[in-house]
Image (cartoon, grey):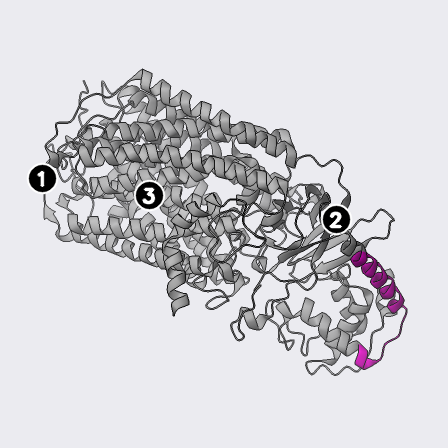
Amino acid sequence: MLLKANRLFKLALGPVLMLLSLASAGALAAGSKVNQVNMSPGVTDVGQNIYDLHMLIFWICVIIGALVFGVMFYSIYYHRKSRGVTPATFHESTKVEIAWTVVPFLILIGMAVPATSTLLEIYDFDDAEMDILITGYQWKWKYEYLNADGENVSFFSNLRTPQSEVYNTEAKGEHYLLEVDEPVVIPVDTKVRFLVTANDVIHSWWVPELAVKKDAIPGFINETWTKATVEGVYRGQCAELCGKDHGFMPVVVNVVSKEEYADWMAVKKSEAAEIRELMAQTFTMDELMARGKAVYERNCLACHGANGEGGVGTAIAGSAIATGEVGGHLEVGINGVPGTAMQAFGGQINDVEMAAVITYQRNAFGNNMGDMIQPIDVYNHKRG
Amino acid sequence: MGAHHHGPAKGLSRWLFTTNHKDIGTMYLWFSFAMFILGGSFAMIIRAELFQPGMQLVDPAFFNQMTTLHGLVMVFGAIMPSFVGLANWMIPMMIGAPDMALPRMNNWSFWILPPAFLILASTLFMEGGAPAFGWTFYAPLSTTYAPPSVTYFIFSIHVLGLSSIMGSINIIATVMNMRAPGMTYMKMPLFVWTWLITAFLLVAVMPVLAGAVTMMLMDVHFGTSFFSAAGGGDPVLFQHIFWFFGHPEVYIIILPAFGVVSQIIPTFARKPLFGYDSMVYATASIAFLSFVVWAHHMYTVGMPVAGELFFMYATMLIAVPTGVKVFNWVTTMWRGAMTFETPMLFCMGFLVLFTIGGFTGLMLSIAPADFQYHDSYFVVAHFHYVMVAGAVFSMSAAIYYWLPKWCGRMYNEAMGKTHFWISFIGFNIAFFPQHFVGLAGMPRRIPDYALQFADFNMLSSIGAFIYGASQILFLYNVIATIVAGKPTSDEKTWDGAEGLEWTVATPAPYHTFETPPRVK
């Protein structure tokens, strides 16, 4: 109750708080706060410059607003008919018109100078120490580290918030809708260049604290960069309407020390090697089903339902594809169905995962086909 | 009255076949109000879903249909036709013309509108749902990934464009050819001036929109790849074409509103408009600049830095003529003898809130800062300050201002003022907090949001419901006035009003200025 009252009080004071928070500019810690009312300067120099620019223009607007509204309200109060005034008759003055054309023009030049220098700074892509290729998919992000040794590491980053929280059957966690299964990791104090593109429709990669927002456009590669100066977890979202689950494809960036980053990268590389090994393995039915269930929940459930009952996508339980011949089922999983929301997952999940999820779909939800698909089958299907 | 003078026909055929500018104006106004209610109810669904975090009422796909249709219906169905309706009623009466120059085309340009919106609304009941790609319908979400109803959407946009072009041609022809003797261009009321310039903007950009949707149609059905990189096209090309239409479009919406405010403020300040000439030049400058700023909607698409700089500088320049307008309005009030009837209240509301929307517009023009604002709720707040508090408030002012002249009955002043205050308060509760959540990082067009945005969103929804409810009061007040308002036959409803429309009888007869007045 007290908490509620306190929050309402804060709400009512929103505008005042905004002004106050300006006074303590730069003191904001990482992460956007409950009832935050202003832009965060974030953890990059560019972010700080953008913030300063934002505040400069804000204050110029406040001053002009105070003058214009001041004159207006003075006039509303003193120049009312009820006070018995007689209206003046003046209606033009070239001098005044010139003055209020020229003065704003000069103010604009004053704004344009810092704006231009910040923009040029943002457009300086030179001297990037590492590159990450970011690809937007409906509705997840793929990160590919373009390592200098040629050993690239890539993974998908999916929303981790469960449907039960979205549909209110479970209490919402602290980072509701802003949490992913695998965050992108970058080292601190390092100029990281992001190459941004998309696989289907236009997305936009936005992390307010890193002061980066860039559209991900299918068929084109945009570049942008950041250099975080403070370690921490920074959260953002897709900013460009990209279809049904536009609101459900967050970005989480872990900024870590350079040592931690090196360790993390080593682990990722060995994981990649492990998967290459797994590809050659033969799995038992139980192993495939267990892996498949996890893959299903991450990639299929949103459209096909928790029990394969369908939704945006068609039902899998009892479907002609899932109970038909294996080749047809693999084809849909790997290459998708053009012209529908069913994407080509062949490039999104690895062959082990594909084998497992196809097996799972054929043996769950009452589809008791009894057949198993191994990674080698997926590999062969891809090879045609 | 001569024998050839006749009143309106009876029954339905009066409305179906009418070529009378007043009848057509009335139909436009009622139609736009119906669309305002429809688009408003979509907004209520949006705000109800956003009342709390989590999905409660609709699914995300339907939510996207609502945001899309809300935008389309409000822009093309509510705001634009309402000002065309106002132009139909007022332009002939303001320039001393007996009717519009092309009365049969006038009938057509209205009557193709309802079927166009019927088609658009019917997409809600189609397989795959209504368009769900936002009112800006960016490709390839609106082409390769669109629901089948996109074809109906394209057809509907074509028809709307046709209607707008015909309406504009009519306004241009009327203003250029049918001014009363002595009514030189620089004596025209500002509402006529702003509409003349708006009409030129419409004729220039509506065909561009038609081109954009035709290219979409080709991509969807005929195998072209205008907007698909896979076939050698470019999705960003769509945005360039769309915003080449879209930016002038926002001035198409706001310039007539400037005209309305420029008529009303002098009336209630009892003092002539300050800087008439500069108002005309400022309007023309805004219109000109509107053609060279479109890519400020696209700062994040990856333009070269030279492009960013050009569009940033050009956009910032718009602040100059817009500032001139605001200064002129305030100076008109200075040392006047003001009273604050409902139309004046709405104009004051317009002046304050539009100026705030202008300030946030200036902030948005700064390309580096826009990297943080773009596609956030800050943008939503910005354009609702200029669209709602700009266009809709001035439209409300216009209705209260001229309604007594139209129907010979006075509206209920107390109810009008109540409507204003509830609107004003509700609007600000709804949209002011959106600046905060936007700056804090909430993207627009999302059906669900992170917990730190919860309180402001709830507040915003409450404000939206209040604002929505106040429009019911507006509707009631207007109907009550027409049916049972206190009769008035004063030629001048407002003692400070100037202009030819106040020289004809009240209520305005079916035909006015059959013999042209002489303007000194």
Amino acid tagged 1 = Ser
The subunit carrying tag 2 is: A
**CA separation, marks 1 and 2?**
74 Å
Q: Position of residue B520 (x, y in %)?
A: 18, 18
- Helix, strand or loop at mark 1: loop
Return the residue at label 3: B82
Q: Earlier in the sequence, mark 3 or mark 1?
A: 3
Percent x, y for residue B396? Answer: 27, 44
Q: Which residues are magenta?
A: A263-287
Do pointers 3 and 1 mark residues of a single chain? Answer: yes
Determine if marks 1 and 2 fall on one subunit: no
> Would you call the spot at circle 1 few (<14 residues within 10 Å), some (14-19), or many (20 or more)?
some
Amino acid type of the residue that numbered disc 3 sits on in the rendered structure: Ser
| Residue A30 visible (yes or no) | yes
Q: CA distance from mark 3 to mark 1?
A: 26 Å
In the picture, the disc for residue B489 is: 1
- Residue A363 x %, y %: 74, 80
